[in-house]
Image: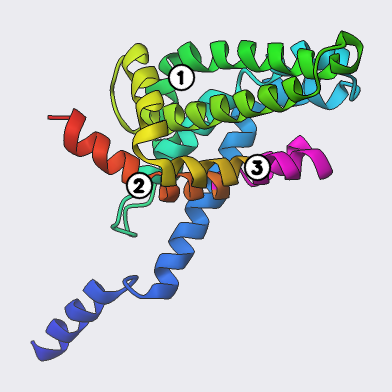
Amino acid sequence: MAAVSEMASSGRQFGEGPLSRVSALLYTLIVVELLVLLASLPGLVPLALLDADASNIPVVALCALPFGPAVSAALYAIGRRSTDITDIAPARAFWRGYRMNAGGVLKLWIPWLVWMTIIGVNLAGFSAARVPSWWAVVLVLIALASSVWMANALVITSLFAFRARDIARLAVYFLFRTPVVALGTAALLALAIVVTAYVSVFAALALATVLAMALLSVGRRMTDQVRDRFTA
């Protein structure tokens, strides 16, 4: 009986060590990363064929349509990751998040892409427009603020069930309510932009799950306040 009790005790402890937890996290990140790439394929394939030309900015925005729901599903899968490492199903969580949130994400993602396309086209034709140079700085700041807003919206819509207009308002509210979160998110976006500019958009997508996990960590203060103040 003592031997059976000892075996049961060791069985309960199996997989509870730090190595097992790290392995479970790596497994989750790898699976979710592969699924992000799979869900993004409809945009990735034509994007790989495009020339790096300013005239292709609207087409790039069109290619980016699948990225929003894919990143949202990654945020859901990582954010809802079970603390029980014997119950790891990242693929199931990813596709559940994708089905639940794709429609709501696109209601915000599409207008943001249109807005960013307008800014991108204006910046690309800036030298020919003969406008004051400070206007370019204003456009860049607007684009950054809009991107931080979109990141907030992605996190909120991935983890909570709100209407799209309420998510848009909350994303604006937390730009000012949690400035530390906004600054951290801006830093992550800057990193993604640098990787995209100096390597490729595919390299940035290869880091999608790492950036998603960092975004969830940076935005924890925001999500805690959403949970405490705006959910029952």
| Quadrant housing residue 85 | bottom left
Labels 3 and 1: the sequence-earlier one: 1
Q: Which residues are magenta?
A: 191-209
In this rendering, the label closer to the viewer, 3 or 1? 3
Q: Residue at x 63, y 10 (%)?
A: 114
Please tell me the numbered disc located at residue 105.
1
Dot 3 falls on a residue whose secondary structure is helix
Q: In the depicted view, which residue is nearer to us: 142 or 198? A: 142
Callout 1 environment at 10 Å: few (<14), some (14 to 19), or many (20+)? Answer: many
Q: Position of residue 48 (x, y in %)?
A: 83, 27
* In the displayed structure image, the side of residue 43 where residue 212 appears, left or right: left
> Do labels 2 and 3 touch, CB within 8 Å?
no
Q: Does residue 95 show up?
A: no
Q: In the depicted view, which residue is nearer to us: 61 or 191? A: 191
Q: Position of residue 71 (x, y in %)?
A: 53, 33
Q: CA distance from mark 2 to mark 1?
A: 20 Å
- The kind of secondary structure the magenta stretch mainly shows is helix
In this rendering, the label closer to the viewer, 2 or 3? 3
Please tell me the numbered disc located at residue 220.
2
